[in-house]
Image (cartoon, helix red, strand yellow):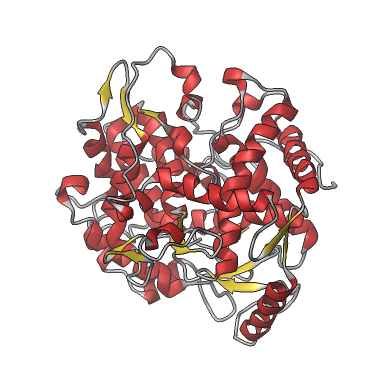
Amino acid sequence: MGLFGRRKQSNYTDGDTHNDLRPNYKMQRGNSNPAENANLPDIPLPKAPDPNLDPAGYLRSIYAVRERSQLVLEKAKRNQLRHFVVDMSKFDDTANYVVAIIKRDFHPDYSSIPPHGRWQHFEVGGRPRVDQLMATWPSTVNNHERTRRLIDLFVVSVLLDAGAGTKWQYKSKESGKVYRRSEGLAVASLEMFKMGLFSSDPEQPCQVDSGGLKRLDKEKMAKGLQVSIDNPVDGLEGRTNLLIRLGDALLNQQIFGLEARPGNMLDYLLSHPSTGVAAVPIVPLPTLWNTLMDGFSPIWPATRTQIDGQPLGDAWPCSSMPSHPTQPWENIVPFHKLTQWMTYSLMVPMQKLANVHFVGVELMTGLPEYRNGGLLVDTGLLTLKPEDARRGLEQYQKNAQKQGQPNVEVVPLFTADDDVIVEWRALTVGFLDMLLDEVNMLLGLQGKDKLSLAQMLEAGTWKGGREIAEVSRPNTKEPPIMILSDGTVF
């Protein structure tokens, strides 16, 4: 077919015979493009916490992700990074590659591009699994409860969506088809959800609650994910412990209710003092963000970066950041990738089914993960410096000696807290913002027709990063730099 051969859209390619059960839910693009919603009342957004007064609060906020990454991007423009050489002459090549992918799959109807989110992964192979799931529920289950159930599912699925590794695969019990990576984890989590693995109520398997999660163990998760010696998944223990700790976090009744379900955050958000009431509920993005950060803070490993004893989650010291002896927060760059991925993903069912409108979604950033970041390396915009490349290759060779680990198509490998990875991720956030402006210009899109960042991630950079990896490393399809996953970062 060639790299830019057009891929089929929305055709059922699973080989399954089933009826089209897709309800006529209209996707609202306004969640990512505020200009389209000028008729809604203006809901003010809260200010970012002052880092000098509340450094932990600032670094946990969505505001800090872009602001801190921008400092690394500015060094990149001057080619003053610690670990990467930047060739800005390749920026146009990167942007043109992304545009070619988007045009191939969506020209001329760019408005049909859905925002980046977990929903699309459930539909791998063109099968509308989420709609089919909802079609099995009786009509007495109203849209609010349907939204709660999808939030239950999406929360667990997102938390399981760390890199699975190059060898793992999942064979669907329903279709017999084999899936890998994010889509494989999506289908696996959906089928585990339908089996009631995350529910403590045998009469209601399609929910997630504290009791169900606390009964999980490594063996149950291995069985659900079809893990074996010949089918290893990266970070199985980390994933399992993450879900067990989620069971503890759900005991926060203020957010998750007496049922201790993730889905009850819908009721919390709708009744929140910052939520505006108009033709539709209007929720400020920072309100959803803080709900996820505060509600799920107990699940992150205690070994993560802390300020004043408060864990920050996915935030790491970076040598390319400013350093001040009395302000230790200044050398930390936050990403909160899983929380951002969850935020993008949970907005979709809340919009589709509960008609919630979110304001301030422009505060969200591109996801600093290996597909978006790998695109920047594979197109030549970023090149790892020789000393770091040698160190990463040595670590790859050591890791390759372990059972089940990749040992072909050798690439540099680092742990998630390595300064190389932290710098790479910060660059990914910054360059994705730059690419959005360039991509919209090259597509000739202006005003309300511009792609949102979430749309470019979905149709361009994430997909493009995966496809260029498939061409560059066809045996493993791995990124140009690998991260040793503990199951909780990517």
Q: Compared with residue 323, is residue 111 higher up or lower down, i.e. above or below? A: above
Q: Compared with residue 345, is residue 309 higher up or lower down, i.e. above or below? A: below
Identity of the residue drawn at 34% across and 61% down = 197
Q: Looking at the image, which residue sits at the far front?
A: 325
In the rendered image, residue 322, in percent from the top left (x then y), is placed at 49, 58
Q: 439 or 242, which is in the foreground? A: 439
In the rendered image, residue 331, in percent from the top left (x then y), is placed at 46, 61
Identity of the residue drawn at 53% across and 78% down = 228
Q: Looking at the image, which residue sits at the far top?
A: 39
Identity of the residue drawn at 64% across and 87% down = 401
263 vs 273, left or right, is: right
Q: 291 or 146, which is in the foreground? A: 291
Q: 297 or 270, which is in the foreground? A: 297
Q: Quadrant of residue 168?
A: bottom right
Q: Compared with residue 368, is residue 37 higher up or lower down, i.e. above or below? A: above
In the rendered image, residue 49, in percent from the top left (x then y), is placed at 31, 44
Residue 377 seen: yes
Residue 141 seen: no
96 vs 265, left or right, is: right
